[in-house]
C-alpha cells in the first residue's frame, strides 16, 4: 500500500508566491511569467500557486549562469 500524505504538512511546507518573491528577490510578475511558461516548478492548489522550496532550490542550481549570493537566496547573473 502507498504512503499516506499528510496534506496539512504538505501545504505548510509549500511557499506562496509572496514568499517565493521575497526569497528570490524578484517581483511577483516575474514569477507569474515563469510559471505561465512552465519554466519554474510549481503546484496549483485550489487555484493558487504554491512552490516547494526543495524543488525551487534544485531548479535554481540547474540554471546556467546563475548562482546564489551570500546575502540570501537571490538569483544573480554570473559575470565570468
Image: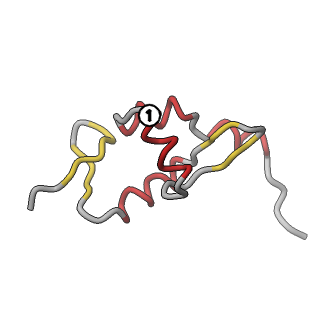
SS at mark 1 in the image: helix
Instruction: Identify the image quadrant of the N terminus.
Output: bottom right
Instruction: Identify the image quadrant of the C terminus.
Output: bottom left
Residue displayed at 21% across by 42% down = 70
* Residue behind mark 1: 21
In the current view of this chain or complex, which residue is farthest to the left? 80
Residue displayed at 23% across by 36% down = 71
- Looking at the image, what colour scheme do you see? secondary structure
Residue 65 in which image quadrant: bottom left
Answer with left or right where residue 80 lies relative to residue 50. left
Give how far across and how far down residue 21 sits, in percent: 44, 34
Residue displayed at 51% across by 29% down = 18
**Count of labels in the image:** 1
In the current view of this chain or complex, which residue is farthest to the bottom? 1
- Between 21 and 32, the one nearer to me in the picture: 32
Answer with left or right where residue 8 lies relative to residue 37. right
In the current view of this chain or complex, which residue is farthest to the right? 1
Residue displayed at 84% across by 56% down = 4
Query: 10 Å neighbourhood of mark 1: few (<14), some, or many (≥20)?
Result: some
Q: Is residue 61 above or below residue 33?
A: below
- Between 27 and 52, the one nearer to me in the picture: 27
Give how far across and how far down residue 33 sits, in percent: 48, 45
Give how far across and how far down residue 40 sits, in percent: 50, 54
Give how far across and how far down residue 36 sits, in percent: 56, 50
Q: Is residue 27 above or below residue 42?
A: above
- Between 26 and 59, the one nearer to me in the picture: 26
Answer with left or right where residue 59 lies relative to residue 76. right
Amino acid at each position: 500500500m502507498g504512503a499516506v500524505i499528510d496534506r496539512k504538512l504538505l501545504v505548510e511546507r509549500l511557499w506562496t508566491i509572496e514568499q517565493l518573491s521575497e526569497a528570490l528577490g524578484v517581483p511577483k510578475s516575474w514569477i507569474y511569467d515563469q510559471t505561465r511558461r512552465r519554466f519554474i516548478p510549481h503546484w496549483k492548489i485550489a487555484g493558487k500557486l504554491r512552490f516547494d522550496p526543495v524543488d525551487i532550490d534544485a531548479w535554481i542550481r540547474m540554471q546556467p549562469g546563475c548562482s546564489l549570493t551570500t546575502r540570501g537566496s537571490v538569483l544573480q547573473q554570473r559575470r565570468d
